[in-house]
Every structure is written in structure tokens, then in C-alpha cells.
Amino acid sequence: MLIKNLLISSVSTLIFLLTCSSGRTQQNEQMTDSLLLEKIKNIDVSLNSIDETDENLFLNSVSFESLYDDLSPAGDWIQITKEEIDKDLKDGEGQAYSSEIAPDAEFIFIWHPTVTEEGWRPYTNGRWEYTANGWMWVSNYTWGWAVFHYGRWWNSSKYGWVWLPGYVWAPAWVQWRITDNHIGWCPLTPNAKWNAESGITEVNYTYRNRDADWVFVEKNNFFNNLTGTGIIKTSENGDLITRSKTILSINSDNNGIINNGPDVKDIESKTGKPVKQKVINFWNIKGKPLVGDNDISVYKENFKKLEYDSNGKVTNYSKPRIFKRSE
């Protein structure tokens, strides 16, 4: 859907640029060939686009070589077994299960970030922005473009917070909890399987996180840059969870995946400030998103599909250059 639209748009733009190039008059010859080529090279017209309508994190069809390289400086890659994932994710159900993992567990790698903040949890050290695709997390980390928009997190009993790569982009992969005066969120685990038809809801995802996994803030602090201050102590999470209602509604339309969450009008009422809806643009610069008055520019990875030889063996499946083995 979204990929198809982007492809059609890209091809149309390419044809337009080439047409302009061939029909230039003396007046518009100021647009040099080098400028035209610069515009064209930033257009992705790949016919090998990844299917983002269905994603199983345990049976992925793409190479994560780029993620292995980009995230290695900021954390450790760990080779994990499906038994360990089963043990960690037994508290609840979803549409995907680790029993579906390919028999060769050699290729299951998770990532553990090197962070120094005490009590760190995913989707902290950043802020929320309201977009045409729902609530988007804007991270302060240079590596946030990957781990807060792809894949899933869980709090491993052995390693702490770890991330399993995925290839479908979303504004944020989280579920929400709301009270009269508070908003909470928690990352979805690998049990949350993305499917465009069914989405991710309370019906097909029932994993129960520990109380301390949740992040809560007062509603009037929701738009603040959360760097430790403003986040409510985890000792209060149990009471907040008991008094809150869950919001889990991730779906999609022609503009991509939408993370529905807290009611905008309610937040406007609590903060006394209007909330402006922004448009998400994808660009080819890795790092922190660029937030403007009307839009947000964020990097989107161009994953490569796995390739197979005549014997059905994967030819471009890679591993992290340095990784730890599960004990």
C-alpha cells in the first residue's frame, strides 16, 4: 500500500524530471545536469520493495546487515536461542510465537543498548509528536531511528532490555495506558505480529509487562523532552496501572501505519496548548529526526530481501561482526 504509493510517486517524479531535462529552454537551462542527477539519485525506484503488509519477526525475509553495523557501536549484539525467547515471553499471547523460529537458531540476534541512565526503559530520553500517522516517538539518541521504529523490545530476565530487529516502520511500537491525569506507554514485545488487515489490538495481543516496564507521565508533561525529569517513579506504576485503561490500536491506511493513542483534545485541555498535527517525511539521513513546524523528516531503511541459490540456501544472510553468545 504505502510502498506501492511511494514507488508510483517516485517513478512519476523521475519521469517528470527527465521530461523537464529533455525539454529545457534557454531560460531554464540554469538547472544543470549535475543538479538533476542529484535529485534523481535520491529517489528510490527499487522494484524489490519489501512487503510491509505482514511481518513475522521470527521468520523475516530480509537482511539486517545494515542494522548490525549501525548499532554495534552503541550496544552489544547477542546470539540467542528460541528457548530463551520462549521463557521470557511466556506471560501472555500474541499472533507470533517463538516456536515459529527457523530451526537454525544461529541467526537469531538481539541487541542490548549501552546506556548509563539508571532505570532506563525504551521510549525514554525523547519526546512525543502528533502526526498524521498518530503518535510518533522522537528520540534523542542517534540510533533511535532504528530501535524505536522497527522491531520489538522486551525486558529479558537475563540481559535486561533487549531489541529484536524488524523491517516494518511505524511511528512507535507501543501500547498505552490512560488515567484522568496520566499517560503511560510500554514497548510491544515480539509477540506482537504486524498484519495490515488485523492490526495490533487488545484482541490479538495480550502480553502483560511487569509494572516497572511502563513509563508514566502527567498529562501536562506529555509533550516535554523526557530526559529523566518528568517521568513518574516506577514505585507508583502499580497504582497507576490499576486505575488506568488500556489503549492498543495500531492499524494502517494508504499513508502507512498509524499508532493511535491518547486523545488529542484531552491533552489540549490538560496542557492548555493546541496540538498541531505534523506530516512524516522519509529522507536518507540517519540519526535524529528533523522536526519542523509542519513536518518531521526521519530516516527509513531500505532493507534488502534475502536471496537464495538454486539449492534454496540463503546467500546474503549476515551476522554482526562482533557478538556475544548466549550462555
Image (tube, grey):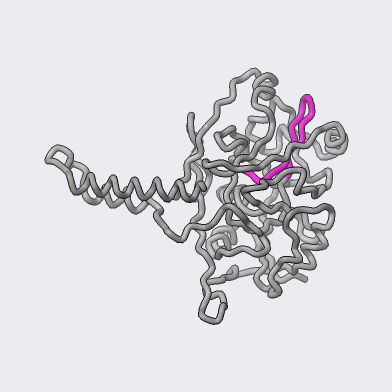
Is 257 situated left or right of 10 in this image? right
Q: Residue furthest left?
A: 26
Q: Position of residue 125 (x, y in %)?
A: 65, 41
Residue 115 visible within the image = yes
In the image, residue 312 above or below residue 301: below
Q: Residue, x 23% and y 47% (percent of image)?
A: 19
- Residue at coordinates 51% horizontally, 71% vertically from top-left? 307
- Residue 25 is covered by the magenta coloring: no
Query: Which image quarter: residue 191?
Result: bottom right
Dominant SS type (magenta): strand
Which residue is nearer to you in this view: 277 or 252? 252
Whole-percent x, y for residue 7 in the image: 42, 50
Q: Nearer the viewer, residue 254 or 248?
A: 254
x and y, in percent, of residue 300 in the image: 51, 50
- Residue 219: percent from left, percent from top: 72, 27
What residue span does the magenta drawing correspond to?
Answer: 172-186
The answer to whether residue 171 is visible is no
Location of residue 183 (image quadrant): top right
| Residue sticking out furthest to the bottom | 311
Q: Residue at x 45, y 46 (%)?
A: 5
- Residue at 62% x, 63% y is 60
